[in-house]
Image: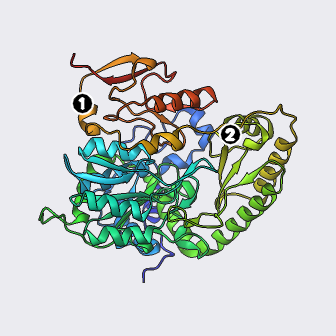
């Protein structure tokens, strides 16, 4: 057992910041002395003293032997991993590295169609060919959940040469599928199970939270420590267990391939402030995690109970009859259905934020989703409850319930990928008016954000349903990212050979 009281990175940074010397190394602000005054006024001077480069005592992220190695070893023990890597480019680089470490050009990877855009980036970088599975769709809630073990089993039977399976666990709404069953099926084919656990970094620290991905059998999981723990934005971790060897007979272990992949997608000038925040967040959870999560769950249950009693509102909860796509719910994630008020989620979000001082994590057509974490206070919860009470009292004209046309129609039509995302990314393109792109192959990522789930991606055939859904998102107040024309009047497609 390691001493989880330690914070080796913070100790090393403290020693460096208190050591008087003349700095002739990056960054150019020289320990804060050159920082512009408006930024110093905003953040204070002390933080810049810790904004250092790879000095001798601070170790090296790509070849750790000292403070970073010790901090990563402490994190591995705290989160139940064999090996942990700190990430300073967010979970995005972890997902990209996981795909790069398991797939090469033309290799197949099985994954849900409601993956984050980072997985699409991983497909482009690796040249892998996606075998997309449709997530289980809840028509009542108008929400897609997890892929099911049955879908994974069928896909592996059809594609036994797949190199990996990737699962989103939990979804942005806090829904968890049957990861244990998926792990057993995946391992029967002797391939790794990769998990996008960006929103589940807190799962390991309380028995009333869903089973952590590693405990459920995942070989690799990527967690956004900044999303639900107390790390700084962009600070994440990649955890590995087991030691699977690539099926091509390569002598490189999975761990070695992760190391190589991370060198491609992480900055060579990592922020030690971000790294130190990971060290601190790990220590905090290792020592106080259960207590902090108990308090967080109590606050979340209070919000869930009070808001569910407000007329015309409901909250997403465990179904009376759980399915293999919905076996657990992260109860610190609160999703409120507002369509009963005659509002879209986008309109409700704007009212709560601009007029009532309550800011949601993200909005969708029918829902608002809130992350309740260890940083929230009883005053926050009271303001959230009062905000919904006030919202429910607004005298609104009746409106028809707005239902997404995407999940219910598009995902049921099958796999539209025509060529690999990488091939499409590097193929010559042309820009056409949106109405003329039907049945053309998309050349860019088109993604409502948040939650960052692409509607279209390079290599995918553009359907009429996709066009209509994107138009619906824009018309109801949503925001589209990734594409060249954010107004969505045009799209880039592969250039026609005619």
Tell which of 202 and 340 is nearer to you: 340
Left or right of 351 on screen, residue 320: left
Above/below status of 469 relative to 492 = below
Q: Residue 185 carries which label?
A: none
Count the labels in the image: 2
State the SS at label 2: helix
Question: To which quarter of the image does residue 29 belong?
Answer: top left
- The spot of residue 455 in percent (x, y) is 45, 37
Q: Nearer the viewer, mark 2 or mark 1?
A: 2
Q: Measure how far apart labels 2 and 1 are at the Cα level.
A: 37 Å
- The spot of residue 343 in percent (x, y) is 74, 36
- The spot of residue 36 in percent (x, y) is 53, 32
- The spot of residue 402 in percent (x, y) is 67, 36
State the SS at label 1: helix
Above/below status of 60 relative to 114 = below
Above/below status of 145 relative to 392 = below
- Local crowd at mark 1 within 10 Å, few (<14), some, or many (≥20)? few
Mark 2 near mark 1, Cβ–Cβ under 8 Å?
no
Say which residue appears at 23% left-offset and 61% top-offset.
Answer: 160
Say which residue appears at 28% left-offset and 72% top-offset.
Answer: 188
Could one spot residue 25 in this view of the protein? no
Could one spot residue 215 in this view of the protein? yes
Residue projecting furthest to the bottom = 1
Tell which of 24 and 488 is nearer to you: 488
Tell which of 471 and 353 is nearer to you: 471
Q: Which mark is residue 345?
A: 2
Quarter of the picture holding the N terminus: bottom left
- Local crowd at mark 2 within 10 Å, few (<14), some, or many (≥20)? many
Q: Residue 426 carries which label?
A: 1
Quarter of the picture holding the C terminus: top left
First-in-chain label (2 vs 1): 2
């Amino acid at each position: 057992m390691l001493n989880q009281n330690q914070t080796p990175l913070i100790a090393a940074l403290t020693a460096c910041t208190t050591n008087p010397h003349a700095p002739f190394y990056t960054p150019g602000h020289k320990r804060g002395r050159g920082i512009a005054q408006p930024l110093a006024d905003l953040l204070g001077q002390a933080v810049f003293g810790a904004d250092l480069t790879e000095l001798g005592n601070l170790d090296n992220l790509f070849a750790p032997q000292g403070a970073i190695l010790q901090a990563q070893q402490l994190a591995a023990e705290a989160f139940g991993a064999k090996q942990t890597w700190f990430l300073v480019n967010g979970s995005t680089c972890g997902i990209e590295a996981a795909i790069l470490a398991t797939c090469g050009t033309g290799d197949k990877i099985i994954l849900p169609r409601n993956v984050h855009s980072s997985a699409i980036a991983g497909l482009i970088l690796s040249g892998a060919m996606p075998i997309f599975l449709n997530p289980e769709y809840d028509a009542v809630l108008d929400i897609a959940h997890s892929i099911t073990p049955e879908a994974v089993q069928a896909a592996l039977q059809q594609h036994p040469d797949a190199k990996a399976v990737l699962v989103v666990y939990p979804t942005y709404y806090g829904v968890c599928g049957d990861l244990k069953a998926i792990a057993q099926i995946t391992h029967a084919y002797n391939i790794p199970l990769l998990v996008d656990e960006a929103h589940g970094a807190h799962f390991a620290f309380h028995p009333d939270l869903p089973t952590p991905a590693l405990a459920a059998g995942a070989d690799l999981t990527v967690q956004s420590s900044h999303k639900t723990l107390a790390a700084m934005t962009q600070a994440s971790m990649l955890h590995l267990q087991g030691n699977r060897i690539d099926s091509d007979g390569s002598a490189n272990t999975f761990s070695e391939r992760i190391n190589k992949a991370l060198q491609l997608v992480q900055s060579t000038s990592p922020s030690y402030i971000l790294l130190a925040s990971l060290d601190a967040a790990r220590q905090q959870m290792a020592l106080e995690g259960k207590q902090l999560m108990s308090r967080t769950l109590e606050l979340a249950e209070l919000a869930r109970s009070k808001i569910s009693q407000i007329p015309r509102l409901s909250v997403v909860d465990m179904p009376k009859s759980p399915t293999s796509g919905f076996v657990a719910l992260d109860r610190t994630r609160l999703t409120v259905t507002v369509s009963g008020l005659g509002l879209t989620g986008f309109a409700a979000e704007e009212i709560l934020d601009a007029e009532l001082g309550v800011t949601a994590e993200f909005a969708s057509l029918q829902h608002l989703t809130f992350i309740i974490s260890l940083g929230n206070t009883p005053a926050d919860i009271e303001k959230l409850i009062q905000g919904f009470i006030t919202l429910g009292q607004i005298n609104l004209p009746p409106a028809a319930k707005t239902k997404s046309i995407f999940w219910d129609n598009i995902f049921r039509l099958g796999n539209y990928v025509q060529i690999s995302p990488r091939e499409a990314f590097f193929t010559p393109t042309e820009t056409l008016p949106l109405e003329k792109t039907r049945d053309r192959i998309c050349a860019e990522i088109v993604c409502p954000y948040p939650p960052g789930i692409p509607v279209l991606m390079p290599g995918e055939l553009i359907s009429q349903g996709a066009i209509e859904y994107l138009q619906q998102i824009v018309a109801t107040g949503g925001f589209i990212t990734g594409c060249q024309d954010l107004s969505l009047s045009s799209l880039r497609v592969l250039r026609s050979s005619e």
